[in-house]
Image: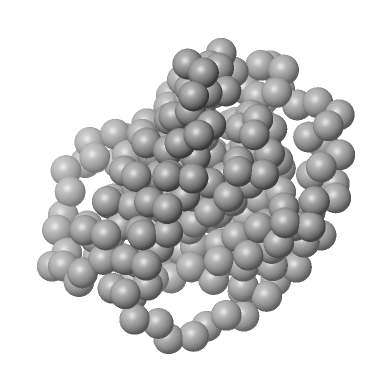
Amino acid sequence: MGLSLAILFFSSAFYTAFGFGMGLLATGLLALVIPDIRQVVVIILLVSLPIELFIAQKNFAKISWQPVLVISAGCVVGAFLGSWHLIVSRTAILHQVLAGLLVACAILIWFLAKERKPKSLPSWAAGVTGILSGLMAGSMGLGGPPLFFYYQIQGVTKSQFRNHLIAIFLILSMIRIPTYLLGGLFNKNNLLITFYMLPSALLGAWIGSYMHFAVNEISFKRYMALGLIILAILHLPSTAGM
């Protein structure tokens, strides 16, 4: 339990400091401690919800809601499909999918690490991004990478990126809760674990909100990409038994 608390503390601090990474870090690490990925995804969903609510209401006026809602419309479709995959798939398959997504995300983060000239995207890109984000969030709790790509390509500011992602994650959480409930994913065990882990996550989120330090973004993102590759390798033993 101590290791799980440390993972939630670190992931939450990272999440509020940089606006992304809760799903990638917390899911990737916790699934090594709690083998049942369904339990992990539900716990992270419930732990993240109060953090998302707090940040979204605090920065409500700074969020451009029109593009957020366009992306969120696609998230609805993707989240239902992703949730169905999480509910019906065997644990070994879920670990395989998680390992594959961690590698894909690492590659994406690595190649988007360098500063690039902002590009405008076609209007349909928002809907496609929402569907992909919802699909990954529903199945693994990893809704951030498609949004990361979408906003990084357009060169939005750090504060816009952080605020918009938190708003979309909050909407995704509100979509996933009823779908997981209907799928029977909530139980006494994961609710009890959430209750014990929530204070650690909230403390990490509070500390992360004050972590305004300068970092070399290119090096930081590439170190993160390498860390995700290592996480994916650590999940390989759990992919057996398909």
Residue positioned most to the top: 88
Number of marks in the image?
0
Q: Position of residue 142 (x, y in %)?
A: 48, 42
In-front residue for pair 43/178 = 43
Q: Residue at x 57, y 80 (%)?
A: 211
Q: Position of residue 228 (x, y in %)?
A: 42, 53
Q: Position of residue 105 (x, y in %)?
A: 35, 48
Q: Residue at x 60, y 41 (%)?
A: 31
Q: Residue at x 32, y 39 (%)?
A: 129
Residue positioned most to the bottom: 214
Determine if residue 71 is in view: no
Q: Residue at x 60, y 43 (%)?
A: 32
Q: Quadrant of residue 206?
A: bottom right
The way the protein has been coloured in the rendering is: one colour
Determine if residue 97 is in view: yes
Vertical placement of residue 52 versus 241, above or below: below
Vertical placement of residue 45 versus 167, above or below: above
Vertical placement of residue 219 versus 23, above or below: below
Tell whether 105 sits left or right of 19.
Answer: left
Tell whether 102 sits left or right of 205.
Answer: left
Q: Position of residue 24 (x, y in %)?
A: 49, 50
Vertical placement of residue 186 versus 52, above or below: above
Tell whether 33 sits left or right of 116.
Answer: right
